[in-house]
Amino acid sequence: MANADHGGRPAEGFGATATGGARTRLHAARLGLWLIAAVLAARQVAVVLATPRGERLTDLETWVGPNGVLHVNGSLYASTRFTGTPFGGLALKPLTRSAEQALGWGWTFGTLLLVVALGLIAARALPPPVGRRTALLAAPIAVSLLMLSLPVRNTLWLGQTSIIPVLLVLLGCFTARGQRTSGLLIGAAAALQPTLLLFTPLLWCTGRRRAALATGVTFAACTGLAWAAMPHDSHRYWVHHMAGVGLGGPADGLANQSLHGALLRLGLNGPLEVALFLTLGAAVAVLALRRAVRCFRDGQLLLAVAITGCAAIVVSPTAWQHQLLWVLLTVAGRVGRRASDRYVWPATVVVVMTLPAKMILPNMASLNPVRDNVVLLAALAAATAVPFLSRGSPFYRSPKPAAYAPAPARFRHLPQLPALRRVLTRPSLLLELLLLRVTYAAYSQVRLAATGGSNSAGRAEAEEHGMQIYDLERTLRLDFERWVNHTVAGTGWLREFLDQYYTSFHFVVPLAVLAVLYRRRPGDYRWARSALGFATLLALVGFWLYPLAPPRLMPTLGFIDTVHGVQDFSRPDYGTLTALTNQYAAMPSLHFGWSLWCGVVIAVLASRWWMKALGVLHPLLTFASIVATANHWVLDAAGGAVVVAAGFGLTHLLSGPRAATAAAAEREPAPTRKAVRG
């Protein structure tokens, strides 16, 4: 599709230099993004090919290996290992011998080429007008997102063919010349994945009736050819298994992200479940096709294709993870009237399609219905509910801009980016919750991996570092942890209070502060949230570089673990929380660091003296609790204070002063500002 017109008279003088510099930076960014895409592709190839043969490309080897279902006589579906259509088996049979000879290299590199082609076509299919920056950067970004997505990673790992139907549909919609060729490609895709027949009514309702007829004829011809060549297998697939239900795994398994699988997981069975599935599926298909037709007539053909693909996921009897790529294509749609809301939907899609569901939502029983069906819910939302903007909307190209606090650039040769400037308006709550959850999931994973994935792996090193800290504290005469620990352990009410304080307020207070700031002080919320994020990131570096055993896990020093009870030091993984978190992530102490962050924010922003006093009291009580319960050394708290100070410093360095301060300074009359400077 044509990009936006970039014609015009050449600039002169400094303007020409500036334009040339911008063009150079744009091409450099494009090259950098292509390098990232190449690195991601190389990493995927390395992961697949470095895995032993019996553990990689298991689906492909199951199909075409020496004992694969395509290689031996008998039914394709005798063992339910083959999940494709009979036509898919018929198309794969000629590849059996070549796949046996080069199982891995040829298939993996061929799949990578298909992924790159898919990304290039999707980038070129963006609705016009397309700016120069988007035209240059869209392709490498699309390829990188595809490489990171779970469907592509599963396809490469398992040796699946799920890229081919998506690519055939995009080729038929965006590159094929003539409606018959378009219908031929889409019909072949439907013969491989039957629910893609939903594209037939889309083509018919958008005036491409020859393509719709060609799609139906091609699907019927391919299916009939497979029925003639393999009548027994065709009967097993279409009649016995009802278009593939039950193949490849139980239909109620978490890997099946279709509406049918969700209803089964909710406990519905039998005729009631079938009737409900057919009714809801028909409603979703009708709503999705109406939305897709509107998008097509609005000139957003890629979004129309993506919406129809999402509807195919929902109404399919089984939609395995490697078949869910349609959801990622919905990032082409624009949502939100405000600039701050523009990234909510793309961020949601990218997170859902690149991270496992267990990292997106916490492991809580009340959230299991959402977490177990997170991709299905994203597909359902894209197909029926997400309010995509039409190109005729005034907010499509020009959303309401964010209000930035005035602040000078912090670097001479690096202009201050909008992402780093102070925004005065309230950010999107959904995006913030998504960011908070994903950041905490990544924090938990990195924290656990800091000792090699288990607490026993770094025990010797952590205890050695513990002795180093203890010796340093004795030199500095700060080694009062044992006295405090034993004193508190012998005082019942004080022990209970500090134990409760240690276990209860670590997350509650920071989340409460963030919630109040978000509701009452949105500009200050961004300042405080950024400082907390930088501090936590720096703490992760400390956990990684310096695993440290807390006093309670030092077997020779005689500390009492007042929270977790007596430790069995003869066990490699002692401690009651070793299965949940890294017990040697003690330096710096985020228990104290986060409490100090709360104290600073409350002391700076609170309007009443007693609120400020409570803010100062919280880190003091936290310090007392981490020392008294033997969960941290005194120097751990000092490390926590250092990373918090660095977090506030980096926030100021990268984005200027606090938003409220900058805005107040801008409103202040010029003579007053001059007098203050004087």
Image: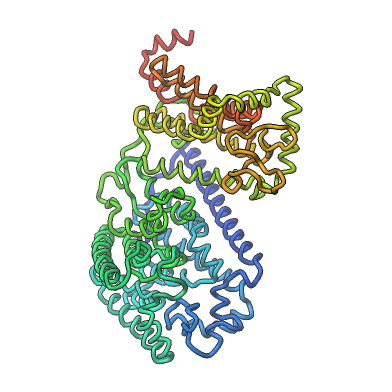
Name above or below for residue 519 compared with residue 662: below
Residue 653 seen by the camera: no
| Rendered residue at 32%/40% (across/down) | 338
- Percent across and percent down for residue 420 are 47, 34
- Percent across and percent down for residue 224 are 36, 87
- Percent across and percent down for residue 366 are 38, 50
| Rendered residue at 61%/75% (across/down) | 103
For the image, the number of numbered tags is 0
| Rendered residue at 58%/24% (across/down) | 491
Relative side of 377 to 208, left or right: right
Relative side of 493 to 169, left or right: right
Name above or below for residue 561 compared with residue 310: above
Q: Nearer the viewer, residue 161 or 432?
A: 432
The image quarter in which residue 565 lies: top right
Relative side of 167 to 459, left or right: left
Residue 291 seen by the camera: yes
Q: Nearer the viewer, residue 218 or 576?
A: 576
| Rendered residue at 74%/26% (across/down) | 472
The image quarter in which residue 211 lies: bottom left
- Percent across and percent down for residue 469 are 72, 30
